[in-house]
Image (cartoon, rainbow, N blue to C red):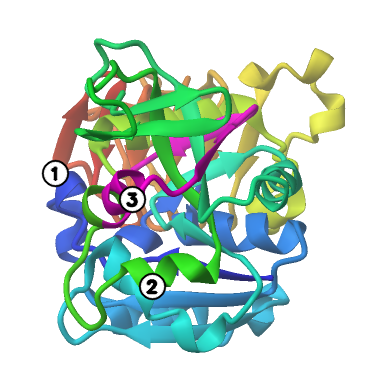
Amino acid sequence: MKALILAAGFGTRIAPITDNIPKPLIPVLNRPTIEYNIYFLKHYGIKEIYINLHSHGEKIAKALGNGSKYGVSIEYLPEKEILGTGGAIASMEPFVKKEPFIVINSDTIFNFDLDKMIESHNHSDALATLGILPAPQDDPRSVIRVDGNKIVRMLNESLYDTIPEGNAMFTGIHVINPQLLEFIPKGCFVSITSYVYKRAIKSRRNLNAFYIKGNWWDMGTPDGYLDCSFDLLRTLPLKFFDETDILNDYYHTKYEDLKEKNNDFFVALGKKLNFPPIKQEPPIVIGNNCEIENSSEIVLGPNLIAGDGARLTSDHDLADAVYLPGADGTRVIYGKRGKIYY
């Protein structure tokens, strides 16, 4: 089975961070977000991975290479003009013939049983299976209506004469049959949801729904990024990304030593830290080469993540904060759960 990771977008929802860092390379717990996608797919035996590129594409390709360091193969699909989600999926046509393939967004992190989603698709006779979550009608993301396992509404299109209220949201992961590609115009900008899936619904074609039982994080906004970062501090280890992989060779609390897996006590420390005796309130993750002010007033944490080369001082928030690599506290984005220094 093959997979496409969508990585061409501009990342406008989390700007200005993406002015310099491609959204797929924004670190979560000091690892690029897209690496979570790669390890997730690899865990379920999917090692032929395609990645579409446009904004900062050369940086993404340089960081990931041919995939050998992850134990997968990566092939890049550059877009001179951005093609949208549907156009990117259409570019898979030369590489998929009869077998379904996976599509996943590069700004999401999942922790659920992908095999069950694939199994659901294989038993559905559907053009595509969408990973969804229940959502109340007043949630603006609730634009899908599911009846059993069948999608009967997509945005403002429905199988029914009267458009029913939505009861689910789309998480951005699909299992797609190659036959769906017949619905997609080639070589132009196309949205998979507002054009392709709406047309499929209008044509009364079968779209299958799979309720994700596990975790899903969308880190494409500042609030989503902070939610993802702080939640992961208490969710580790992930099924597909163990502590050794995700934290490299940081010194860190072993999960098996945590009382009842209570990750409130989790501490991970990188190398070459200018780290005087400082009070710590876990969970915290401090990357390599961080500079930390020697002050009796400093308390690290709780909920502190510092990337490589970050500078931490008593002048800035050291709890409920994420410092991206090299951040010195002078540039900040505010979110509901904390701050992002970049």
SS category of the residue bearing label 1: loop
Residue 70: x and y in percent read: 67, 73
Left or right of 301, for residue 21: left
Residue segment shown in magenta:
196-219
Q: Amino acid at mark 2?
A: Glu
Residue 152 visible in the shown view:
yes
> Which tag is nearer the camera, tag 3 or tag 2?
3
The residue lying at 64 percent from left, 76 percent from top is 98
Residue 236 vertical position relative to residue 92 in the rendered view, above or below: above
> Which tag is nearer the camera, tag 3 or tag 1?
3
**The disc label shown at residue 182, or none:** 2
Quick check: is 173 in the magenta stretch?
Answer: no
**The disc label shown at residue 34, or none:** none
Local crowd at mark 2 within 10 Å, few (<14), some, or many (≥20)?
Answer: few
Residue 8: x and y in percent read: 29, 69
User: Do callouts 1 and 2 mark residues in contact (Cβ within 8 Å)?
Assistant: no
Q: Real-space Cα distance between discs 1 and 2?
A: 50 Å
The residue lying at 62 percent from left, 66 percent from top is 100
Residue 250 vertical position relative to residue 211 in the rendered view, above or below: below
Quick check: is 204 in the magenta stretch?
Answer: yes
Residue 247 visible in the shown view:
no
Q: Real-space Cα distance between discs 3 and 1?
A: 53 Å
Residue tagged 3: 203
Q: Earlier in the sequence, mark 3 or mark 1?
A: 3
Residue tagged 1: 330
User: Do callouts 3 and 2 mark residues in contact (Cβ within 8 Å)?
Assistant: no
Left or right of 254, for residue 109: left
> Which tag is nearer the camera, tag 1 or tag 2?
2
Q: Camera-side residue: 302 or 289?
A: 302
